[in-house]
Amino acid sequence: MSLYSIVVPVYNAEHMLEELYRRIRQVFENTIHEKYELILVDDGSKDNSFSVMRRLREHDRQVKIIQMARNFGQHPALLCGFAHAKGDFIITMDDDLQHPPEEIPKLIREMNRRDDVDVIIASYESRKHGPIRRLGTKFSVWATSRMLGKDPDLEITSFRLIRRFIVDAILQTNTYMPQIGNLLVLTSNRIINVPVRHDARAYGKSGYSLRRLIRDLIFDITTHTAFPLIVVRNIGILSFLFSFCLGIFYLVRYFMYGSAVEGWTSLMLVCLAFFGLTLLSIGIIGMYLMNILNEAKKMPHYVVRREETDD
């Protein structure tokens, strides 16, 4: 009999935790009939989430609770849960009930059937996210496919079933601002999707604003690829070749027709354009240098304030 560790990052989810726990317990006791542990990681919630977590822990020792010192983000919270997980398989899911616990058996059945698969990621039959989140997700899938050499048809979501050795490998990485989906793709190419239901958010609204989606995408691009630098380099090469050919053209024109080159307005516009491109290039290089500096600091991904994880 296998042990399954369900890791759930928690942020301002006091109204959803009890239902999430109840449904997970029913699935494992009535459908899967396997051992499990539920690891709830409070990512600096501002509501009474940790109090609810403590009540669940008092009622059921299979619930392990961890409170982080501040809000570090979803991915560091997952890493924290991974470090405390004892299962042969690790399941990650959100705290907002958009990932129905009743869909977990689909992932487990497919994993048991496919010995050649290391990670199963749920793909949503019909997304219940808002339009901004859906648009951001589509663009992110395209961008990460180009950056990481990932199959563009592979959908990356936060509802996953992962074999133990993959989680152990991820825990050995010490990269700044880790992205679990990207780390999975970099660790194994034996990843498949399984379609599942995606429910509407029961309470509140998503913490993924357009600004945060753009920020995460820019970080992914400047961390995993030199694409912006290559674009600027190619623009520079093309600009040099164009200016060289244009210089020869005007030189021949001067010797053949004796006409001087005019057009100070055009000259100033070109200069301003290239000055702007130069500043853009410096800014892009600065972003890469800042990422290198942050990597060199080796700051911890998270700080645990308190935990109750002993059986």
Image: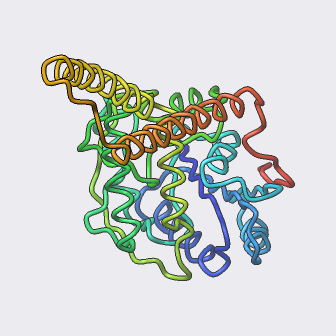
Foreground residue, 32 or 245?
245
Query: In terms of image quadrants, where is residue 291?
Result: top right
Vertically, is 251 above or below 239? above
Foreground residue, 165 or 181?
181
Relative image position of residue 6 (x, y in whole percent): 56, 53
Relative image position of residue 234 (x, y in whole percent): 34, 26
Farthest residue, direction front: 258
- Residue drawn at the location 59% of the way across and 77% of the way down: 16
Foreground residue, 149 or 309?
149
205 horizontally vs 189: left or right: right
Relative image position of residue 203 (x, y in whole percent): 54, 82
Relative image position of residue 244 (x, y in whole percent): 28, 19
Query: In terms of image quadrants, where is residue 133?
Result: bottom left
Vertically, is 96 above or below 144? below
299 horizontally vs 230: left or right: right
Question: From where the camera sits, is residue 302 visible?
Answer: yes
- Residue drawn at the location 77% of the way across and 51% of the way down: 309
- Residue drawn at the location 62% of the way across and 53% of the way down: 37
- Residue drawn at the location 27% of the way across and 36% of the way down: 151
